[in-house]
Amino acid sequence: QVQLVESGGGLVQAGGSLRLSCAVSGYTFSSYIMGWFRQAPGKGREFVAGISWRSANTNYADSVKGRFIISRDIAKSTLDLQMNSLKPEDTAVYYCAADPTGATRYHYWGQGTQVTVSS
């Protein structure tokens, strides 16, 4: 098992920036794929971005390409999401997740952190 705890959410104006972090602990996760998801009220959970912990290869949803940057800090054991040029439609609860299979089958989830973008 791994434990995931998100932080950094809050209220920001459209066009602004926000940085989310996810503290990762527990069993080894060096071979895991890590990702960020989000869920807006009344909508399903949406994939935002993913990263290989070992290689740092990344993948982004079309809706956030060019605006968001996913990264991992090996020394601090954190998964981060730099969110730039925020839009009201980015408003959601953001979750970090871990895939131990290497096949984008996410099994572990954090509790979520609220991001609200005002217009």
Image: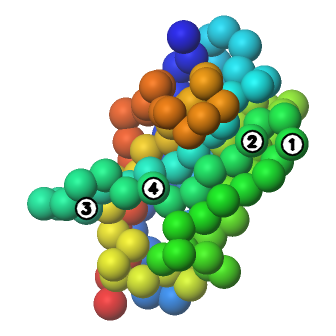
Q: Earlier in the sequence, mark 4 or mark 2?
A: 4
Query: Disc 4 and disc 2: Cα gap in Å?
Result: 15 Å
Rendered image: mark on residue 63: none
Is there any visible trace of residue 17 in the rendered image?
no
Rendered image: mark on residue 40: 3
Vertical relation: 70 (above or below) 83? above
Q: Which residue is mark 4?
A: 47
Structural crowding at the residue carrying mark 4, measured as other residues with C-alpha within 10 Å and reported as few (<14), some (14–19) or many (≥20): some
Query: Disc 2 and disc 1: Cα gap in Å?
Result: 5 Å
Q: Which residue is mark 1?
A: 55
Q: Amino acid at mark 4?
A: Phe
Q: Earlier in the sequence, mark 1 or mark 4?
A: 4
**Residue 43 placed where, x, y %?**
19, 60
SS at mark 3 in the image? loop
Q: Amino acid at mark 2?
A: Ser
Q: Which residue is mark 2?
A: 52
Q: Are marks 4 and 2 in contact (CB under 8 Å)?
A: no
Task: Identify the residue at horizontal 60%, vertical 64% (top origin).
Answer: 60
Vertical relation: 73 (above or below) 8? above
Structural crowding at the residue carrying mark 1, measured as other residues with C-alpha within 10 Å and reported as few (<14), some (14–19) or many (≥20): few
Q: Earlier in the sequence, mark 4 or mark 3?
A: 3
SS at mark 4 in the image? strand
Task: Identify the residue at horizontal 61%, vertical 23% (top origin).
Answer: 100
Q: Are marks 2 and 1 in contact (CB under 8 Å)?
A: yes
**Residue 96 placed where, x, y %?**
50, 41
Task: Identify the residue at horizontal 47%, vertical 25% (top origin).
Answer: 108
**Residue 112 placed where, x, y %?**
38, 42
